[in-house]
Image (cartoon, rainbow, N blue to C red):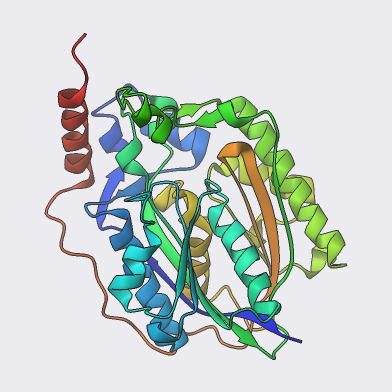
């Protein structure tokens, strides 16, 4: 029997912090309003492209696994904010890290993208198609924000996370998964005119996230709840056998509602929302790295991943952690220095947007 074990992990968070108090200076809101509705207190704003974040996370994950990039056979790059569509953004990372033998794909399942990639790549390893892979979630969501729209702009942040998956004879890694997409809900969370259709019709790019909070909440709780219950039943795993739950970090109220539906204990949940906000595809690997650094992951633990995103996509994964919880090595990969604060980066983005608006 072949298993797909997580042997390396790494994350990259840009240094510039944008706190709720900073956002108060650019829109009509307050720290209390944001925190009570989302659980978010601050987020990171990137001064570099998406691929630079993914590169650093990938190099750190490879070092933690003790794996040479030349031994990687597949890079699955989950993102909703690619630097380029053709060729894919993952190929930028492939070239920069020297993964010369790897196949590369970008995967867009919105915020569920990392979980989709994790499930599919794990299955490829378990079937014997490949032996070593990198799964990366990387986002630069600040580049899409319309900072005049309070309902969406306050929720998101930038960052990347990565894991190395390797074939193993040990009974560890992914062992149950469920993926889905709610029909008829595409308009509830969307970025209209952000694609080739708009470009082909020469429509002006006025990027903004359309966001229907109450409907998203309802579908997110149902989708993640159904997925979690499905993987528990599929694997004959009891709730009390779960050691750790690492959900997509979108909103603390959604997380709490899913946990209540399952009948689980919030003490088992890893939450990073307060510090990093919603980093879309990278929330789960970032939270996993944090849990490892804090000593919350122990050998043999049963861990549940669950996520939802635009589409509305949803899913869950069950995995058994292996024997090692500390990295075999450390990478010296770092982002270039950032000379601006998070607020200064956002103010510059607001100025660019105003300058690019078509004349009325």
Instruction: Kindly identify the residue that appears in the image at 54 percent across and 53 percent down.
Output: 113
Q: Is residue 147 above or below residue 237?
A: above
Q: Is residue 106 above or below residue 109?
A: below
The one nearer the camera, 123 or 150, is 123
Residue 226 percent coordinates (x, y): 78, 47
**Split into 4 quadrants, where in the image is the N terminus?**
bottom right
Residue 35 percent coordinates (x, y): 45, 37
Residue 265 percent coordinates (x, y): 71, 56
Q: Residue furthest top?
A: 360
The one nearer the camera, 354 or 154, is 354
Horizontally, is 103 left or right of 344 in the view? right
**Split into 4 quadrants, where in the image is the C terminus?**
top left
Q: How many marks?
A: 0
Horizontally, is 275 left or right of 122 in the view? left
Tell me if residue 321 can be seen. no
The one nearer the camera, 18 or 164, is 164
Instruction: Kindly identify the residue that appears in the image at 60 percent across and 58 percent down.
Output: 115
Instruction: Kindly identify the residue that appears in the image at 77 percent across and 45 percent down.
Output: 261
Q: Residue furthest left?
A: 339
Tell me if residue 305 can be seen. yes
Residue 119 percent coordinates (x, y): 65, 64
Q: Residue furthest front?
A: 200
Instruction: Kindly identify the residue that appears in the image at 57 percent across and 61 percent down.
Output: 117
Among the 4 quarters of the image, the one containing residue 329: bottom left
Q: Is residue 119 above or below residue 111?
A: below
């Amino acid at each position: 029997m072949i298993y797909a074990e997580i042997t390396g992990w790494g994350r990259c968070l840009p240094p510039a912090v944008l706190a709720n108090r900073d956002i108060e200076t650019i829109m009509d809101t307050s720290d209390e309003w944001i925190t009570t509705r989302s659980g978010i207190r601050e987020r990171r704003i990137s001064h570099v492209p998406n691929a630079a974040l993914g590169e650093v996370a990938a190099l750190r994950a490879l070092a933690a696994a003790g794996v040479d990039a030349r031994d990687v056979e597949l890079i699955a790059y989950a993102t909703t904010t690619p630097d380029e569509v053709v060729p894919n953004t993952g190929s930028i990372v492939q070239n920069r890290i020297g993964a010369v033998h790897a196949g590369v794909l970008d995967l867009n399942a919105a915020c569920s993208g990392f979980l989709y990639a994790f499930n599919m790549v794990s299955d490829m390893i378990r079937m014997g198609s490949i032996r070593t892979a990198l799964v990366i979630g990387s986002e630069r969501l600040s580049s899409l924000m319309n900072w005049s729209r309070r309902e969406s702009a306050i929720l998101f942040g930038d960052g990347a996370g990565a894991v190395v998956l390797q074939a193993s004879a040990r009974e560890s890694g992914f062992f149950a998964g469920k993926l889905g997409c709610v029909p008829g809900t595409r308009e509830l969370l969307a970025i209209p005119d952000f694609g080739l259709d708009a470009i082909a019709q020469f429509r002006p790019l006025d990027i903004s996230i359309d966001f229907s909070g109450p409907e998203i909440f309802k579908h997110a709780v149902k989708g993640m709840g159904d997925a979690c219950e499905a993987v528990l039943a599929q694997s004959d795993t009891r709730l009390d056998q779960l050691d750790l739950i690492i959900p997509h970090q979108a909103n603390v109220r959604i997380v709490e509602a899913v946990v209540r539906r399952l009948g689980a204990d919030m003490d088992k949940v890893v939450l990073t929302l307060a510090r990093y906000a919603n980093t879309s595809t990278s929330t789960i690997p970032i939270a996993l790295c944090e849990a490892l650094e804090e000593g919350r992951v122990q050998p043999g633990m049963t861990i549940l991943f669950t996520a939802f995103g635009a589409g509305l996509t949803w899913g869950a994964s069950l995995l058994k952690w292996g024997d090692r919880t500390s990295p075999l090595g450390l990478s010296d990969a770092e982002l270039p220095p950032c000379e601006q604060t998070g607020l200064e980066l956002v103010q510059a983005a607001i100025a660019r947007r105003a300058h690019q608006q078509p004349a009325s």
